[in-house]
Image (cartoon, grey):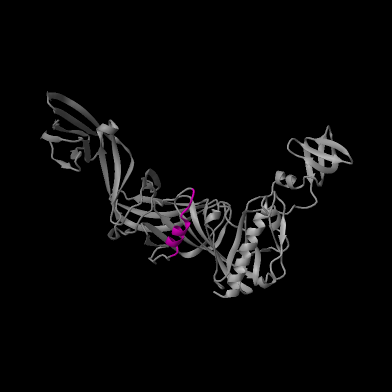
Amino acid sequence: MDKKLVFGIGIVLLIGLIGLNSIIGNEQITVKAKPNFNVNEVSYKVAVGKPEVVLFDDTAQNIGEKGSSEITVYNQDFALVKDVREMFLEQGINLVQFKDIASGIDATSVFFQDLSFPSSFVVEQNYEYDLVSKNKILEKYLDKEITVQVVEGDQVKEYTGVLLSFNDGIVLNSDGKIIALSNTNKIEFTELPGGLLTKPTLVWKIYAEQAGNRETQTVYLTTGLDWRADYIATVNDDDTALDFTGWTTITNNSGTGYPDTKLKLVAGDIHRVQESPQYREVFEYAMSDGAAVPKQFGEEALFEYYLYTLDRKTTINNNETKQISLLSANNVSSQKEFVYDGQSNGNKVQVKLRFNNSESQGLGMPLPKGIVRVYKKDSDGQLQFVGEDEIDHTKTEDELELFLGNAFDVTGERTQTNSENFGKGFYKYEYKIKLENQKDEAVNVIVKENLGSSWTITKNSLPYDKKSSSEIEFNVNVPAKGEAEVTYTVEYRYYY
């Protein structure tokens, strides 16, 4: 590094330390930089109490409109913003107001880059959110003259005087008289006092080694941006296939818009430390580009999560909910199932829909968690809603099971018909499960039984499948307008 630059940086840090340690109360100190640091004859001020009061003066430049941006939205109500803008910097120290940022910004996560001149850097940063309000303006007009209109009976009277207090009504000193006013109708101020903002602003002191226009990128984390996946499945007449579409729903309540932005979405459960956000790790994860696939969103693995990249730019306005197509697949093989779990659901038989997230079925991409809404056409050819369920993050080739509701014409009844205790940890139970079908066609019902541990089936009227160490299933065919039952005996032996 150039020796002059190193010396200059040292002077800046020394000035900052001297300034901050030389202030008593809210007294402002104006520091003139040394000539060899070349700040273009511009002095800057330092304050302990309210730095925004002295930072906003004629020496500060406002950065213009956003040139372009990229946002990576996580489905945990936060986003990584990359804001690209052009700015002109003089050689030396520049005071910059960076406006139109998200109101939910995490100021500790801000990362500034001069893409044209990498040697530029931020010497000092303030995040100013002292926004314009009636009380804020009144606070800054203490001991200054204002004009107040109040309602007195049927008349509106006007008073002009020096503002003494506003905490419990307006108190003025008007020509030596102390006037306390309530029922304020209108307050007039001569101008907007310095230090108040209409929107949150980052205020920087940026050192530039050389003057000129440059492209800059500001990266930060913010709350107020979230996304979710929503899916629609339309089943065919005999429930053997479905059309499956997915949408991303992005909600922006961050306090600013993102015109012509590159959009990326991250699906996964990311750990964040509340008091010290790991923004640098998140920044590194989100820098890579998404792989292109023949859908609106390309997807790729990102650390232990999935990154979806929109293959075109879009605009996301503030206070807007936007939906963008994620995927679409037609004629996906599906299977409707009736499932009876008498231990958990009493007489209710659940209706479920199963299909595979496989490429051979026209899907085969990692599916973000979201709600699947299922529709089916009635006899008039009109779509009707038949149920919905929420899926978790789903890998490719995994099976999806949607619980849509309880069957109307198929019911069950579970009865314990016998119970014996032989002592020394030896028990025997007998069960009967009765199923009734009022439909015009036969149905197959999956009967689930949770047995716990240390069990042995000693007698059963139908074959069963052992699904786990504690669960078995019977497949029971129930005839049209008829009944069917399954019985079994289970023994438990516990050794103490």
Residue 75 at x, y percent in the picture: 44, 51
Asked if 208 appears above or below 53 in the picture, the reply is below
- Name the foreground residue: 254 vs 90: 90
Q: Is residue 286 magenta?
A: yes
Residue 154 at x, y percent in the picture: 84, 33
Among the 4 quarters of the image, the one containing residue 466: top left
The N terminus appears in which quarter of the rendering?
A: bottom right
- Name the foreground residue: 18 vs 409: 18
Q: Residue at x 26, y 39 (%)?
A: 339
Asked if 179 appears above or below 45 in the picture, the reply is above
Residue 331 at x, y percent in the picture: 31, 56
The C terminus appears in which quarter of the rendering?
A: top left
Q: Is residue 18 magenta?
A: no
Question: How many discs appear?
Answer: 0
With 18 as the anchor, is 399 left or right in this view? left
Q: Residue at x 30, y 43 (%)?
A: 352
In the image, farthest residue toward the right: 175
For residue 257, say whether it is visible.
Answer: yes
Q: Residue at x 13, y 37 (%)?
A: 462
Q: What range of the chain is rendered magenta?
A: 275-287
With 201 as the anchor, is 285 left or right in this view? left
- Name the foreground residue: 460 vs 203: 203
For residue 97, say whether it is visible.
Answer: no
